Image (cartoon, grey):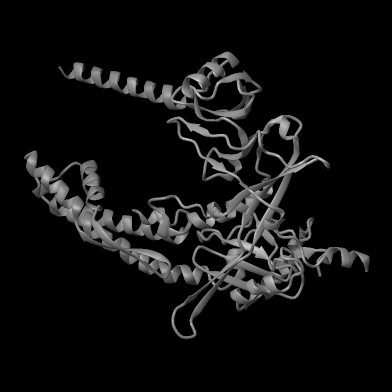
């Protein structure tokens, strides 16, 4: 359930949760058919959803939140409620436990989604992050940028095929801006442009902040998890060589 | 018996729907008259001693900025919000030093610079800035495996010339798209998803620089050192750091010029 919250626009997670819910529905149907007592369907649905609640251990794995359920809090709550109100717990018991064990189906789907996501949306290709830039524009985010720099979209489209990933020398770049200067506050930013209104590949759920290098021949792509640097031969800023 | 039960249920639902409509969905009524505004400001904050309403600046359907002048000849600001079917004052600042009103914290397009500069301070223009410090970060995963991150410095500026003492201004569109990109990236970061909504653009800071006509000495004596009175209406009103020229970067290479000369 909560997996949908993680990646609201990640099509792979949405698809996997769809499969998990179908499996839950199928298993519930099997229990229903086997049981002599037939509870109301909407009650079964509520029981399953409440039973999903659990005490769990969460941790990050490959930048994905993984949730290992331990204590079936939802199941216990329903059990207590049924006993207190003198309802027929036996008719619902198996559905409640199905709800709890479904957490592990979601866990499996999360673990499976990670490699699939990496194959469908290669993390080391600029095109994954720069898939849609029809409405994109450059913002001069530092005074060392050319004020009216215009993005050459055709050029970007061509360079996207040939971009090469390069090493990020973060400390060196940082220090360069302080070494190459005149007066105390005279500084050139290495990446003085931000490329805005771009979209990553459809359904990837990726969002990035993209900066363009002062010569127009490099992009620095930052996601919540990672940063990538690409260089190419021709400037994507009109008028900057 | 059954019928009676159902009737009560229907009545309860209608009342609930009506309550939700009235307090949360109903369109704002006409904004109060200047006299009513003055009364309310002075009732809420007896120290305000507001005596004259200068204007009402409608920022959106539910948020209005009301600059006022007090008995002590202070130029103040009051911030009004349509909430629970009433126009309520959320904050009153006794003096109008520039601040930023974040109507919706997660949406920079709702941010407004607001000010009411005392005329005796003789300020002619203000420069507003959006800044993010240049930085870098190296995580070491043992041996050769290290991950570098470089955060470029951001410095965006815009200026406003003062024709009246007071005013409100939205962020320039470009700033909004810069900040939105950071916020979107943050929302997709799962480790923060459940509790605090996480807006990386909050790491950016806003600042301003006053400027004067030639020959006029820098003075903010009548605009600074006010205080803000907050009511229980929720509002995000952030302080704007006053910047010195030394806080800002200027380009080192004048590349654009040298190229056009050739």
Residue sitting at the far bottom: B143
Above or below residue B222? Residue A60 is below
Above or below, B70 relative to A126: above
Residue A128 vs B13, above or below: the answer is below
**Residue B71 percent location from the top left of the image:** 60, 20
Q: Quadrant of residue B233?
A: top left
Give the percent coordinates (x, y) of residue A111: 36, 68
On screen, residue B84 versus residue B39, left or right, reads left
Task: Find residue A164 and report its horizontal and vertical position in percent.
Answer: 65, 77
Left or right position of B21 against A214: left
Q: Quadrant of the C terminus of chain A?
A: bottom right
* Residue A135 in view: no
Of B215 and B255, which appears nearest the observer?
B215
Q: Is residue B240 left or right of residue B128?
A: left
Towards the viewer: B166 or A212 = B166
| Picture residue at 43% right of the left edge, 72% below the top | A115
Q: Identify the residue at image location x=77%, y=72%.
A: A234
Figure label count = 0
Give the image location of residue A43, x and y in percent.
Answer: 21, 42
Residue B231 falls in image quadrant: top left
Let me know if residue B169 appears in the view: yes
């Amino acid at each position: 359930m909560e997996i949908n919250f993680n990646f609201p626009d990640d099509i792979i997670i949405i698809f996997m949760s769809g499969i998990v819910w179908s499996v839950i529905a199928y298993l519930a149907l099997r229990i229903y058919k086997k049981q002599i007592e037939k509870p109301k369907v909407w009650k079964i649905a509520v029981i399953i959803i409440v039973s999903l609640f659990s005490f769990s251990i969460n941790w990050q794995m490959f930048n994905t939140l993984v949730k290992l359920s331990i204590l079936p809090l939802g199941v216990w709550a329903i059990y207590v409620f049924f006993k207190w109100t003198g309802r027929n717990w036996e008719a619902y018991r198996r559905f409640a436990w199905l709800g709890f064990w479904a957490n592990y189906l979601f866990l499996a789907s999360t673990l499976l989604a990670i490699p699939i996501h990496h194959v469908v949306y290669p993390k080391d290709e600029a095109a994954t992050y720069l898939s849609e830039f029809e409405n994109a524009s450059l913002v001069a985010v530092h005074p060392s940028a050319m004020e009216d720099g215009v993005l050459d979209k055709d050029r970007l489209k061509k360079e996207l095929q040939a971009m090469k990933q390069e090493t990020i020398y973060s400390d060196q770049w940082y220090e360069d801006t302080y070494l190459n200067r005149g007066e105390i506050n005279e500084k050139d930013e290495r990446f003085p442009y931000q490329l805005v209104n771009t979209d990553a590949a459809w359904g990837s759920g990726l969002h990035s902040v993209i900066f363009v290098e002062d010569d127009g021949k490099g992009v620095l792509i930052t996601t919540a998890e990672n940063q990538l640097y690409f260089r190419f031969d021709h400037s994507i800023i009109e008028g900057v060589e | 018996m059954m019928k009676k039960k159902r009737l009560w249920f229907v009545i309860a639902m209608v009342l609930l729907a009506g309550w939700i409509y009235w307090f949360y969905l109903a369109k704002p009524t006409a904004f109060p008259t200047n006299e009513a505004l003055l009364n309310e400001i002075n009732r809420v904050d007896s120290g305000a001693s507001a005596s004259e309403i200068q204007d009402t600046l409608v920022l959106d359907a539910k948020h209005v900025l009301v600059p006022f002048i007090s008995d002590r000849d202070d130029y103040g600001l009051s911030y009004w919000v349509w909430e629970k079917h009433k126009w309520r004052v959320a904050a009153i600042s006794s003096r109008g030093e520039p601040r930023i009103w974040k109507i919706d914290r997660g949406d920079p397009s709702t941010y407004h610079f607001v000010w009411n500069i005392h005329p005796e301070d003789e300020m002619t223009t203000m420069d507003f800035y959006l800044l993010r410090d240049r930085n870098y970060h190296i995580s070491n995963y043992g041996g050769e495996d290290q991950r570098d991150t470089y955060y470029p410095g951001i410095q965006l500026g815009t200026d406003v010339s003062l024709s009246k003492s007071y005013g409100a201004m939205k962020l320039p569109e470009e700033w909004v798209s810069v900040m939105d990109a950071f916020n979107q990236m943050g929302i997709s970061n799962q480790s923060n998803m459940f509790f605090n909504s996480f807006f990386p653009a909050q790491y950016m800071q806003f600042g301003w620089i006053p400027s004067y006509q030639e020959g006029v000495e820098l003075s903010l004596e009548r605009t600074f050192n006010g205080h803000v009175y907050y009511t229980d209406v929720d509002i995000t009103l952030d302080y704007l750091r006053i910047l010195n020229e030394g806080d800002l970067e200027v380009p080192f290479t004048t590349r654009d010029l040298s190229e056009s000369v050739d």
